[in-house]
Amino acid sequence: MGGKGVYGLDLTTKDKPTFLFSKNTTDAGFSRLGQVWSEPTVAKVRMKKGTKYESKDVIIVAGGYDTCYENPSFKLKTSGDNTSCDKKTQAEGNAVIY
């Protein structure tokens, strides 16, 4: 099963990999990251910066899997603190993060 995190390494020099970044559920904007099982896709995205557009390198991964849905009677609650499946108001893995 996947973990709730994404890590980037520069493998240009295979015998000396360089750590680039890590993102997990404690990082701002990543609280709804589920278990990531997908293979990352490298892409270029055209973004507006001021009045001009520029191309930006990005890595795209699926939002992940929420294990709470393994219980057939699981339902999201209208109030709670998202600390467990019986208190969850937002599912994991169904948000766009940029």
Image (cartoon, rainbow, N blue to C red):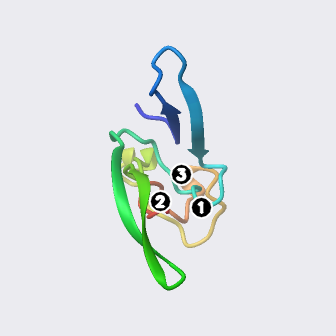
Nearer the camera: disc 2 or disc 1: 1
- Badge 1 element: loop
- State which tag comes first along the sequence, 2 or 1: 1
Return the residue found at the far bottom: 51
- The residue at 47%/48% (across/down) is 34
In the rendered image, which residue does mark 2 sit on? 91
Within-10-Å neighbours for mark 1: few <14, some 14–19, many 20+: some
**Amino acid type at mark 1:** Gly
Report the mark closest to the observer, 3 or 1. Answer: 1
Kind of residue at badge 3: Cys
Q: Secondary structure at mark 3?
A: helix
Question: Cα distance, mark 2 to mark 1?
Answer: 14 Å
Q: Quadrant of the N terminus?
A: top left
Residue 76 % position (x, y) = 48, 64
Q: Which mark is residue 85?
A: 3
What residue did someone put label 1 on? 29
Q: Compare marks 3 and 1 and give the one earlier in the sequence.
A: 1
| Residue at the image point whose x is 48% and y is 55% from the top | 92
Residue at 59 percent across and 41 percent down: it is 21
On residue 57, which mark appears? none
Q: Residue 89's x, y, as percent?
A: 55, 65
